[in-house]
Amino acid sequence: MKDIKRFILPLLFAILGIYFGFQFIRETATLVTTQFPVYNMIPLLQGPTSYDATVIAGIIIPIAIVLYLVVTIPLSAVYILGNRIAKATAYDMNIMSIGNEFGGVRMIRRAFVPALFCITSTQIVLGLLPDFVFQEPDPLIVQTLGPAFRALLSVSSSLLAMPIILAIFTPTWLLNDSGIVYHLTKDELKHRRCPDTMGVGRYFSNYFGGFSLLAFPLTMAANYFYRPFIVDGLPFTFGNIFQAFYWTIGLPVILMAFIIPIILVNEFLLGRFSKPIQNIARKFGAKDIRLEKTKVA
């Protein structure tokens, strides 16, 4: 019963966030289709903007789950190999016996960095390749709908990229949850070096997280303030500025809600997936270790 309770909070977060996201996507996309029927957000789908946006939101979670099932273990093995190549001369790999507790708040927090990474990476791609997948809007659309249109474009593009982005992150979850770590060898500890122990998954996720936390405010400033107000000529009204701040904060929350179902799948399948990846780690030389219990006087 206790194990089931930990899923309640993330499940409620996901349901409310996905519901709000669908409502926003449907209403804003319908408004675009009604007022600007010529504009087609994704030309490849051959449909109005309302169709493009709702289709993406409706199919992306099943696609992400299928991709998780297919690529997580193989990519985890690639991460182990990459870590061994990078750290082979000074580090050993071990499999630590770790606890099983992972509460609902931790599940929600786990979705934060992938959400930022989705938004940031897609905004960079849209900036460099404006008509690659998503059609660049006429300034009149932005002036009429305000920051809500940019938010629609951001949500749709981020959701479209979400399965690929999660394929990068889910191996780090599995590696961390399986207790696979690297640490300095005994010979290296003879030198004046600080003992260094880190999870193999954390080794890679730190790079992704650092990029996301650094690039997110820059891309949001460019996408919701510079482009609409300076480039597209959106008036500097209180309502428009409030919307820009609102969506800067709200977009990660929506993306987190769509990511949480994949995190829940990871929790349900962890017992089946951790053993194969631990066996792969052993083939790369990892040894099993257990933490000693110490009594505090």
Image (cartoon, grey):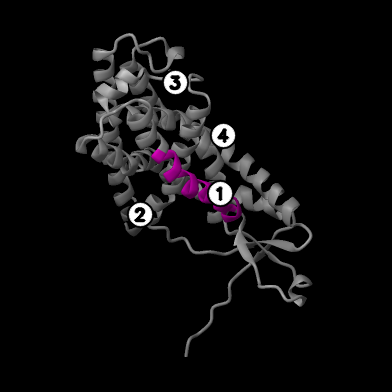
Q: Amino acid at mark 3?
A: Phe
Q: Which residue is mark 1?
A: 172
Q: State left or right for residue 19 relative to residue 119.
A: left
Tell me what residue is drawn at x 35 percent, y 13 percent: 39
Residue 175 x %, y %: 58, 52
What's the mark number on residue 104?
2
* Callout in the foreground (3, 1): 3
Q: Earlier in the sequence, mark 2 or mark 4?
A: 4
Q: Amino acid at mark 4?
A: Val
For mark 3, give the secondary structure: loop
Residue 11 x %, y %: 31, 45
What's the mark number on residue 134?
3
Q: Amino acid at mark 1?
A: Thr
Q: Amino acid at mark 2?
A: Gly
Tell me what residue is drawn at x 42 percent, y 36 percent: 222
Pick the quarter of the image with the N terminus: bottom left
Alpha carbon distance from label 4 to label 3: 27 Å
Alpha carbon distance from label 3 to label 2: 35 Å
Q: Earlier in the sequence, mark 4 or mark 3?
A: 4
Alpha carbon distance from label 3 to label 1: 30 Å
Circle 3 packing at 10 Å, graded few (<14), some (14-19), many (20+), is some
Residue 273 or 204: which is nearer the viewer?
A: 204
Tell me what residue is drawn at x 66 percent, y 72 percent: 195
For mark 1, give the secondary structure: helix
Q: Earlier in the sequence, mark 2 or mark 1?
A: 2
For mark 4, give the secondary structure: helix
Q: Which residue is mark 4?
A: 70
Of all residues, the one furthest to the bottom in this rendering is 297
| Residue 205 is one of the magenta-drawn residues | yes
